[in-house]
Image (cartoon, grey):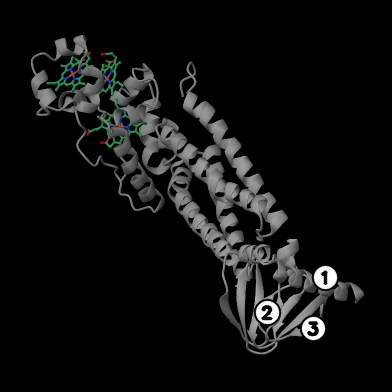
Amino acid sequence: MELNSPLSKRLLIAAQVLALIVYAAALQFLIHTTGGTLFVFTTAAPVLIAVAMIMLGGVLVHHYRRSHSLFVFATFEPGQIVFRQGDEGDCAYFIHSGEVEVLQEEGGKQKPVAVLGKGEYFGEASLIGSAPRNATVRAASRTRAAVLGKDNFLTLLSLMPATQEDVMQRVKERAMKQAAR
Amino acid sequence: MNVFQQDPVDYYGSRFLAVLIVAGIALVLYSLIRYRGRAAGPVPWGVLLAGVAVLPILVTSAGTVLALQRAERVEFCASCHLTMKPFVDDMKNPKSGSLASLHYANRYIADNQCYVCHTSYGLFGTFEAKKEGLHDVFAYYTRSFHLPVKLKHPYPNGDCLKCHGESVKWLASHADFKDQVFSGELSCLQCHAVKTPAHSVALLK
């Protein structure tokens, strides 16, 4: 699951809606204190807050574990989206087997711009620049990839200057290719 | 409410609570509109945590203090109209002659008259009363109560004695049988309810 996946977005929105319900119950109690409003506020509000905090905590832990993951293998079925253009980037992917398509989205249309295979990597650009994903990546065939979280990826680069140069070179090439289109 | 004395808990508590609620709603709306459920980086997470966790916890804590306070008011008792209104009307009727009315009309009890007569002192007296009260409110709104309303336990002498029991005047006028009254063998109401019942209500059936 990608950072800011639809599920994590939905959970965060649901938690915020629960918080709004708590505020509404508190406001109703404050303005018009009766047995009913007091009962709803004192019994339901703590439960809603607990549920909202569990949702928030779940997403937070998920985000943390994603950006600290150390070569976790993930498998993507043909057609499955690895991440979407515009998403927040938290991981880089190193292809172990299979192939992925890189798609550029423009005005609602998806244009294939590259196919990457075994031994290649992607998703590094938004880790270095902290920019959103600049393309959508979709598995073309059943793909196994090693996933490296942002923090570990950056540590790796700082420890291995040769790798860093190589990666920077690749980021530059890809950026120029994109600009040329 | 007493016109001559502001209740500081309610006065400051309700304003504080209002500010917290408005701040909380503003934060959540801002975060919903600005980030639409995506959270990356410390600022969006900070706004989210403040609006969904920190402020709601403050709101419920401050709100609970205020709730405990407001639940003691006569208006609060009266909000369960079907069951409590006859008792409130009786108490506020100076011609009624009931004990509740006498204590109210002369302000022998200054504030929260129902609550004062119907809770026992002691560490858990007020807590116990509120716990049972919460249960009663539930019964009221689910219409699972039975008329006429009765007390769960016989009215304890202690609830009258907490005010009268150490009064020189009372001790003098009740000298002959005060021991039986203290031990609970004799209820205040056995004598007093004859002339002055606790409440003069035509009990609803």
Location of residue B10 with respect to B64 vertically, above or below: above
Q: Nearer the viewer, mark 2 or mark 1?
A: 1
- In the image, what residue occupies the spot 45% across and 49% down? A46
Query: Which mark is drawn over residue B119?
Result: none
Q: Nearer the viewer, mark 3 or mark 2?
A: 3
Q: Residue furthest right?
A: A180
- Callout 1: residue from which chain? A
- Callout 3: residue from which chain? A
Location of residue A13 with respect to A167 vertically, above or below: above
Of callouts 3 and 1, the N-terminal one: 3
Please identify the quarter of the rendering in which residue A152 is found: bottom right
* Structural distance between the alpha carbons of marks 3 and 1: 15 Å
* Structural distance between the alpha carbons of marks 2 and 1: 24 Å
- In the image, what residue occupies the spot 32% across and 37% down? B127
> Tag 3: Cα neighbours inside 10 Å, few (<14), some, or many (≥20)?
few
Of callouts 3 and 2, the N-terminal one: 2
Q: Along the line of sight, which residue is nearer the eye, B106 or B25?
A: B25
Query: Which mark is drawn over residue A81?
Result: 2
State the count of labels.
3
Disc 2 vs disc 1: Cβ atoms closer than 8 Å?
no
Secondary structure state at the residue bearing disc 3? strand
- Callout 2: residue from which chain? A
**Mark 3 is on which residue type?**
Ala
Q: Mark 3 highlights which residue?
A: A114
The answer to whether one can see residue A121 in this image is yes
Q: Mark 1 highlights which residue?
A: A172
**Mark 1 is on which residue type?**
Lys
- In the image, what residue occupies the spot 49% across and 20% down? B6
